[in-house]
Amino acid sequence: MTLGKSDVVTDLDAASTSTSVMKKLPEVTLAFWIMKIAATTLGETAGDLFAQTMKLGYFLTTIALFSVFVVTLVVQLRSSRYNPFCYWTVILSTSMAGTTMSDFMNRDASAAYLSGGATSLGWGPQGLGLGYPAGAAILISILLAIFLVWRASGMTFQIRDIVTFRGEALFWSAILVSNTLGTSMGDFLSDSSGLGYAGGALLVTGVLAVLAALMKAPAVPNVLLFWIAFVLTRPLGATAGDFLTKPVAKGGLDLGTAGSSAVLLAVLFGLMAYAHVRERRATGSPGAAPEPVTQRAG
């Protein structure tokens, strides 16, 4: 899914007086979506690995993974140009943190959410027990509030043209909340809808296919389709991750969180290395300045 239509490109924010800007975020191409799905699937399996398999619990794991997100975000914000390793590491950290944040919000300490016959997980409160509908409603409200602030600021929603600290801060806030929301949606499809892991993944894939078809419809803003798709790739990753790791009796492949996470990490690392090579070729040399992104009329 590529956001190439000029109708979704708005004026650059604080850099609008300049004729060129430094690119900090990637182009939205098919490769972008493949890496997003790989990162979100790994986020699901890795989050479950720490919280459930290693029995750290949702509370401690959420604190630890949110701290990792902050560290990776600082590195990304301090970067002067687009670096695939920095960018996708932040995406991965938001997916992992979003997994346990969602679980902590929606679940409780009942046996239904414990794995391997465990009687408890980690230290501290193991879940607020809000349930998926209430948790999703809260997250949707937060995400809408971020978008309202973003729109009121007058800054662009087109990610390739986000070049200021404030723009990136809004972007990554939306990413963190959308990945947490997507986890809630994926868990609802897997656990409560009756579709199961494979059925939930197929449903989300079908909706994404419809969104891809709507890219050709001039009446539908591509920026809206992008953010809907961005949210939906997270439940796709959540259901795919559960399908890989959950027991066969529950409809999964029972590959385990550790093995699945290791394979997915290798795949994502390979994709990041490929993206890095392509970025270096596009900029001419390892030390060359990146091609300027010229301001376009919105």
Image: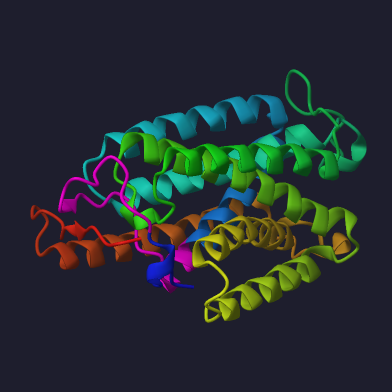
Residue 98 appearing in the image: yes
Q: How is the image coloured?
A: rainbow
In the rendered structure, does residue 34 fall within the stretch colored magenta? yes
Residue shown at 59% from the left, 25% from the top: 63
Where is residue 275, by image quadrant?
Answer: bottom left
Q: Position of 108 compared to 76: left or right?
A: right
In the rendered view, tell whether residue 220 sits above or below residue 216: above
In the rendered structure, does residue 254 fall within the stretch colored magenta? no
How many marks do you count on the picture?
0
Residue shown at 56% from the left, 79% from the top: 217
Residue shown at 18% from the left, 67% from the top: 282
In the rendered view, tell whether residue 124 sits above or below residue 150: above
The image shows residue 209 at horizontal and vertical percentages of: 63, 77
Dominant secondary structure, magenta: loop
The image shows residue 137 at horizontal and vertical percentages of: 77, 42
Q: Position of 27 compared to 238: left or right?
A: left
The image shows residue 290 at horizontal and vertical percentages of: 15, 56
Q: In the picture, which quadrant includes the C terminus?
A: bottom left
The image shows residue 31 at horizontal and vertical percentages of: 42, 70
Residue 116 appearing in the image: no
Q: Which of these two is toward me, 159 or 271? A: 159
- Read off the magenta span: 10-35
In the rendered view, tell whether residue 233 sits above or below residue 151: below
Q: Which of these two is toward me, 220 or 80? A: 220
